[in-house]
Image: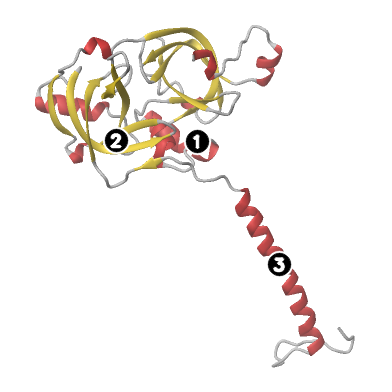
Amino acid sequence: MQNDEFYIGWMQEAPKSFSAWIKKYLFVLLTIIIMLGVLLALSQKKFDSGNFEFGKLTEVKGIYFSKPVPVIKVIDGKDIWGNENYITVPLIGFGKHGADGVIADIEKEKNISLEAKEVTLKGTLLYNDGKLLMQIDANDEPLISVADAAINIADLQKIKQLGTTDIKGEIVDPKCFFGVMKPGEGKPHKDCAIRCILGGIPPVLKVTNEEGRQNYYLIVGADGEKMNDMVQDYVAAPVTIHANAVEYGDWIVLYVQQNGLQHYSYIQEHYNSAYVACSANCLK
């Protein structure tokens, strides 16, 4: 730019040397902005593969059990030995609520107990990473039918004791994690997860093993009691759990022992020999 040229705002046109200088730097600045935008987009985590069939109601038939958390067990054919295969579908309520209230209202209204009965429920499915859950909403009148189970209930109630173990992971609320929110984990989702769990949705421990594969465990107290209030300060953060693990078919439930829930400590894990970290493989 020549020293004897300058631009004043009320001039109709800027001097040629001045406008050329501006165009050159605008081009450089625009290129930098585009490159930063592309890099920022590429650095973002991909959307989670969870699905929430919002607005779509599906009827599911299975056997209802209220413990350790409300579920229906859906018969899924037979194995090579002729035993019934089934899928365990945890139930959750509308919004940030558990399913207990909806089930209790149905039982009160119909004057029946749904425990161990064959029920057909209507609700919204959500699923991710091999796990299936169902949201039931009182406004949808979710109970379609109820009848005595036509199969041997004892087969569905078989459990397998896996022993007491220490396991490290992150507590998530399953409704958001398995389909409603993206992301449904970590600090960005912490406040929402706390409210969902305090509303009665059963907490789940997400564990990533050495191979990067994730496994999921339902969490209850040592005697099977709910511990939603107790976990609120541990949601969306690394934790260690000392628990008795029990396999209920395709879900493992952790019965957390007294003082068995703690924030994860790297120092404790690596320098305290009394602590034994366990990956999901410990239970498999």
The correct choice, above or below, for 18 with respect to 64 in the image is below
Label 2 is placed on what type of residue? Gln
Residue at 48%, 11% (x, y): give it.
243
Distance from label 2 to label 1 (Cα)? 19 Å
Crowd rating for badge 2 (residues with CA inside 10 Å; few <14, some 14–19, many 20+): many
Q: Earlier in the sequence, mark 2 or mark 1?
A: 2
Kindly identify the amino acid type of the residue bearing the numbered disc 3. Answer: Thr
Q: Which mark is residue 65?
A: none
140, above or below 224, in the image: below
Q: Name the residue that disc number 3 marks.
A: 31
Between the C-alphas of marks 2 and 3, the distance is: 48 Å
Q: Nearer the viewer, residue 149 or 8?
A: 149
Q: Which residue is tagged 2?
A: 135
Q: In the rendering, at what x and y percent does residue 209 appear?
A: 57, 23
- Secondary element under disc 1, as helix, strand or loop, is loop
Give the CA distance from mark 3 to mark 1: 35 Å
Q: Position of residue 275 (x, y in %)?
A: 62, 10
Q: Helix or strand or loop: what does disc 3 sit on?
A: helix
Q: Please rate how many residues cluster around mark 1, counting C-alpha atoms within 10 Å: few if below 14, some from 14 to 19, many from 20.
A: many
Helix, strand, or loop for circle 2? Answer: strand
Please identify the quarter of the rendering in which residue 89 is found: top left
* Type of amino acid at the residue the image marks with label 1: Glu
Q: In terms of sequence position, does the residue under pointer 2 or pointer 3 come before the other?
A: 3
**Number of residues whose C-alpha sits closer than 10 Å to that of mark 3, classed few (under 14), some (14–19) or many (20 or more):** few
- Residue 283: give x, y in percent of width and height: 49, 14
Q: Position of residue 191 (x, y in %)?
A: 47, 37
Residue at the extreme bottom? 12
Q: Earlier in the sequence, mark 3 or mark 1?
A: 3
- Give the residue at mark 1: 185
Q: Residue furthest left?
A: 111
